[in-house]
Image: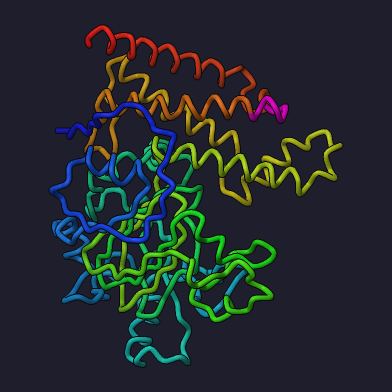
Amino acid sequence: MLRELEIKNNRLCTEKNTAIIDWIDYVNTSITYDEFFSKYINLNKPCIFKSNITENWSCRRQWNLDGAPDFDVLDILYGNCVVPVADCNKKYYNSQSKDDMEMKDYLNYWTEYAKSNYSDSMPLLYLKDWHCPKLFPNAPMYNVPEYFASDWLNEYYIANPELNDDYRFVYMGPKGTWTPLHADVFGSYSWSANIVGRKHWLLFPPGQEDFLRDIHGQLIYDATSDELNDYTKYKAYDKRALKYIDVIQAEGEIMFVPSGWHHQVWNLEDTISVNHNWINGCNILNVWHGLKKELSSVMKEVNDCKDMHDWAEQCQLILKSTYGMDYSLFFDFLTFIAKKRLNVFSNNEEAISFNKYKFGNNHCTFDLHAIKLVLIDFITDMEEKSIYHLICDKNQGHKLLNKILLLLQSHYDAENIST
């Protein structure tokens, strides 16, 4: 039986609190869905769920052997898989150099590295961004907690397997592996559950990352680097003014990272985690603003080629290759979510997430209200850039917006009559 997720407030508040949050709350599963949605997701505020939230996950029993990775089980289950591995000692632009390995070879490396007492003479390899849940959809690894079920990104990709992508990952690596300073893809939220081991997090509220940029606007690779003290290069850095959260995430706990928060993470011991990136009605405006800003940067970068007959199409291709999303994909994504929510009211269908949850009417209204706000600006932007008919060749943008406006108006009219 599906569990209904409902919220009390059905309209997105676009006036966000600008106060800088430099502390983190610990919450447990006694918090209701609506409380978490309003206090943390909508306010873009981080928190850590205590370890009881993951105590019934099968991967915590299977992959964890007395607080360490069970290499034998991992080899049996996934040994023949090809997995993406980053070398934490090799910088590639502002990230880490990546390659593919067979899981059994990675596990052999890991056990040898541990036996060497994590010797500096060996590479520091971190298995990252492995789409394990997509590759093994019927394996009972974990249940997505209800608090993270309003996940448009994975709702879209799971329903469209031909896109061959999703944003559900497994990370695993030895003590000392780490991820450089970054904000999550598309301005998404993320949640990260420790199955084995502990992580050390530095979390920077939105805007604080500007202290960590060099004179060219580039973000520093390592937020703990002494390089920040070079005033000729990092003129904005002010150690006394910089606000951040420094916290240890224990085994079993889940970290919720809000939209646009930069963070840097280290594994304090041999660690395995499950991670999702996700988008919903609370941060879709952030996602849209990021995409619009990125296209403007692309257009500015290749402005000298503007006389090309397919310049606008080329800009979209560049956008897709560098950012991972273009306007067509974004519109298809918005349309998919909007139709699922519209069908709740027009066809009496259920809006289902992860085959376990369904969204209540207020929740669906909230989602449609957020999509409406994005669509209005999206259409305006496309028209200003003279690309509307490139993306919406059959006027789909205005048609979808009109359907949403009509539905919301009738919904609000019904609310007013009942009150």
Residue 222 or residue 227, whichever sits in front? 227
Q: Among all residues in the image, which is located at the extreme top?
A: 417
Residue 201 position, x and y percent, is 37, 68
- Tell me: 32 left or right of 403: left
- Residue at 29% over, 70% down: 248
- Tell me: 212 left or right of 312: left
Residue 190 position, x and y percent, is 38, 53
Q: Dividing the image into 4 quarters, which one contains the N terminus? A: top left
Q: Is residue 386 magenta?
A: yes
| Rendered position, 132 above or below 118 | above
Residue 274 position, x and y percent, is 32, 59
Determine which quarter of the picture holds residue 410.
top left
Residue 166 or residue 341, whichever sits in front? 341
Residue 211 position, x and y percent, is 55, 64
Q: Among all residues in the image, which is located at the extreme front?
A: 240
Q: Is residue 129 magenta?
A: no
Magenta residue span: 381-387
Residue 44 or residue 356, whichever sits in front? 44
Is any atom of residue 346 visible in this view?
Answer: no
